[in-house]
Amino acid sequence: MFTNFSNSNADLLSQMQGLKIDTGILAGGKSTRMGFQNKALCHYQGEPFIERTCHLLAPFSYKQSPLINSNNEHALLSAFSPYVYADILGDYSGPLAGLHCLLSHTEADYILISPCDTPLLNNAYPERMLSRLACAIKKGHTAPILAASVNGHRQPLHCLLPKQALDALATSINQDKLKVARWFDDQPTYWVEFNDHADTFNNVNSPSDLKNLA
């Protein structure tokens, strides 16, 4: 496991050795368990989930706004970022299609991604993921894939993907291999532990989850 860094945002980005880092938000699902209400537009403490996530990730993006993957409500979501894109492959093919969409539209070398439904996520997430990337690059790893883990429970949609992962995503989607966990298992993934921030990864899938949000 890599050691923690205590760098500022600027210091973290400077460690990327000239690489461009983008950020992205997954908001492309049907939200069936939420009664088809767009989870990105649900509120916590008076603020839409999507706005909270944009505020968290924007300082780490060279575009200054995260890319958003969504298959509906584009007009509303464009109030939070000018970069809103629908899935390119499949018909609501799930999160892999969202990851593929975000990677397809970024010009960066890497993109740091979070789903829209973890409104408690804090700055530890982008800082630690970028710190681990800097460490991996320093150790000579080529185009590493990083994803979060909490007390042994993997959180693969909280991930940091290189542009080079685009072809592997497209292949899986075109072969109808849509299970996220399987895709990450098939890749050389580095799992970054967030045991000390476990509660911040609580996701909201239903009205009861929203009601019980800490």
Image: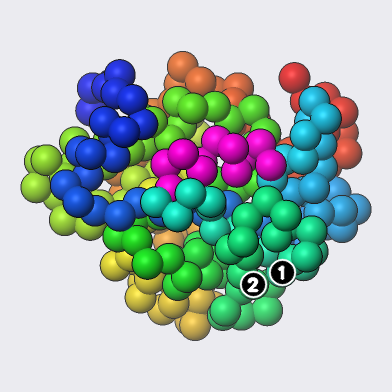
Relative side of 160 to 76, left or right: left
Mark identifier at residue 3: none
Q: Mark 1 points at which residue?
A: 71
Q: Residue at x 36, y 31 (%)?
A: 9
Q: Please say if 213 is above or below 178.
A: above
Q: Which residue is drawn at 85% across and 49% down?
A: 34
- Which of the image's four quarters has the N terminus? top left
In the displayed structure, 48 sits above or below 169; it is above
- For label 2, the residue is 86
- According to the image, what is the colour scheme of the structure? rainbow
Question: Could one spot residue 134 in this view of the protein?
Answer: no
The tally of labels here is: 2
Quadrant in the rendering for residue 152: top left
Q: Can residue 193 be seen in this view?
A: yes
Q: Where is residue 197 in the image (x, y as percent from the top left)?
A: 51, 21
Where residue 102 sits in the image (x, y, percent)?
50, 64
Image: 160 above or below 2:
below
Which range of residues does the magenta coloring cover? 51-61
Look at label 2 and name its amino acid: Ala
Mark 2–mark 1 contact, CB under 8 Å? yes
| Label 2 vs 1, first from the N-terminus | 1
Q: Residue at x 49, y 27 (%)?
A: 123
Mark 1: amino acid: Asn
Label 2 packing within 10 angstroms: few (<14), some (14-19), many (20+) = some
Q: Residues within 10 Å of mark 1 (few under 14, many from 20)?
A: some
* CA distance for labels 2 and 1: 5 Å
Whether residue 6 is situated above or below residue 80 in the rendered picture:
above
Residue 162: where, in percent of width, then height?
Answer: 32, 59
